[in-house]
Amino acid sequence: MVLEAVKALSPAEITELCLRHTLYDWGMQAGLKPMPVVSAKGVYFHTADGRRFIDFNSQLMCVNAGHGDRRIIEAIQRQAEQLPYISPFMAHEARARLGAKLASLLPGDMEKVFFTLGGADANENAIKIARAVTGRPKILARYRSYHGSTGSAIQATGDPRRWPNEFAGGIVHVLDPYHGIQRGWDTVEQALAHLEETIQLEGPSTIAAFILEPISGTNGILVPPDGYLQGVRAILDRHGILMICDEVMTGFGRTGRWFAVDHWGVVPDLITLAKGLTSSYVPLGAVGIVPKVAAYFDDHMFYGGLTYNSHPLGCAAALGAIQAYEEDDMVGNAQRMGAVLARHHRRLRERHPCVGATRSIGLFGCLELVRDRQTLEPLAPFNGTSPEMKAIAQALLDAGMHTFVRWNTIMTNPPLCITEAELDEGFEILDGALEIGDRAVRE
Ligand SMILES: Cc1ncc(COP(=O)(O)O)c(C=O)c1O
């Protein structure tokens, strides 16, 4: 047999073949120019044409441990050598160890998880479990939210990504405590009164669960006022409605605690995880379940299953990622560097008239840009963009920063291994690009 060496693809060929034969997420395909990425280390990634980018969004707020962490890579390698796949009806060591490890980290007395492939199907299964356990049909969710792009998860999503995907009922949306930069925040009392009223009008006995991101992510790093989550917990308890906290983005140290709910001491009935669970080196999601809910399935069928439930490579990667978080105290680093990030946010707000608001908790942050400091008119409309936001996004790339620019927001969510010097480097780039926004601000 003659073995032919596989010829490396040029950067242009990589991009061209990807575009010709694969569909890209959330966009019209014509005109796309995906970067051909070849390697990544720490907070940087490199393209095939030799450019280096500082990753100020941990890709999709998911590579929490940073790129190229040997502990995660070697955990996957060892597992691939030993047992790359086995049916979810079997027991295996990585599943056993990860289940036990998560039980020690998860809030309250949660000690059982159901493993999925990612965030959307974690939410699908959390919703399925809530409906099965309560026997109730409806799910409450918030408008400024994203829960994934599949069936019930996209129905529960409140933001405009839901609009073209609505094909079934059973989800009722409630307003968030935040109403956009111009109207600002409700008080805790107002937000809870709105929730209570919606529950009354819908009929408490028809509602299985309320699914919410404790801190909304892509909708603008919306850190709720103190007391809101505790108040939600109390209302739901009063009506026998389960609380599903979607920590797909906020979990695993992002906010400076293992889980966002830990900031407020709230224990949900179900928690959904993905992204940082493996630092996204391989796909894995999970639903954490409190004992009283999990017990239901002791003597009732669990009508759910996935070929890749508890996939050995996913479980091994998660163990490697958690090892990395613990050995390097990345959760503590997120808290310490979070203070540095917040300082940078304040400085940008002082220096740039286009920065209308900043929000952050740990290494989870965003800037909201405006074209008027008095009226706080956003620099791009809700669910839209503007020439200025596009120009800022391009300027960031040109200066070697990759981050998520959406509507009038710019995200600052670097990997949790970031150093102060690397944060300084990133904010220097932002500082330069924001001058484009300043020029659009009305006197
Ligand atoms: C809060 C939240 N929930 C769910 C999801 C969906 O996760 P996945 O893309 O892994 O299905 C996301 C993805 O961005 C998310 O941010």
Image: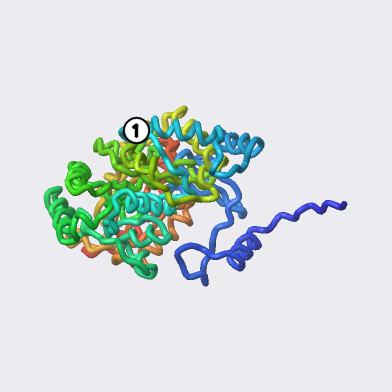
Residue at image mark 1 = 336
Q: Which residue is drawn at 60% across and 34% down?
A: 74
Is 416 in front, or is 103?
Answer: 103
* Relative height, residue 115 to residue 324 (above, below): below
Q: Can you tell me whether the CB of the residue at mark 1 lies under 8 Å from the nearest atom of ligand 1?
A: no
**Identity of the residue furthest to the front in this view:** 299
Q: Is residue 356 left or right of residue 436?
A: left
Res. 386 in view = no
Q: How crowded is mark 1: few (under 14 residues within 10 Å), some or many (20 or more)?
A: some
Q: Is residue 193 left or right of residue 242?
A: left
Q: Which amino acid does label 1 sit on?
A: Arg
Q: Residue at x 60, y 62 (%)?
A: 18
Res. 245 in view = yes
Q: Quadrant of the C terminus?
A: bottom left
User: What sort of colour scheme is used for the picture?
Assistant: rainbow
Across the whole image, how many numbered discs are drawn on residues? 1
Is 266 in front, or is 418?
Answer: 266
Q: Is mark 1 on a helix, strand or loop?
A: helix
**Identity of the residue furthest to the bottom in this view:** 30
**Identity of the residue furthest to the right in this view:** 1
Q: Please identify the quarter of the rendering in which residue 89 is found.
A: top right
Q: Where is residue 414 in the image (x, y as percent from the top left)?
A: 42, 44
**Identity of the residue furthest to the top in this view:** 327
Q: Where is residue 386 in the image (x, y as percent from the top left)?
A: 35, 67
Q: Where is residue 178 in the image (x, y as percent from the top left)?
A: 21, 55
* Relative height, residue 233 to residue 153 (above, below): above
Is 415 in front, or is 46?
Answer: 415
Q: Residue at x 13, y 50 (%)?
A: 187
Q: Position of residue 34 (x, y in %)?
A: 54, 61
Is 82 in front, or is 368?
Answer: 82
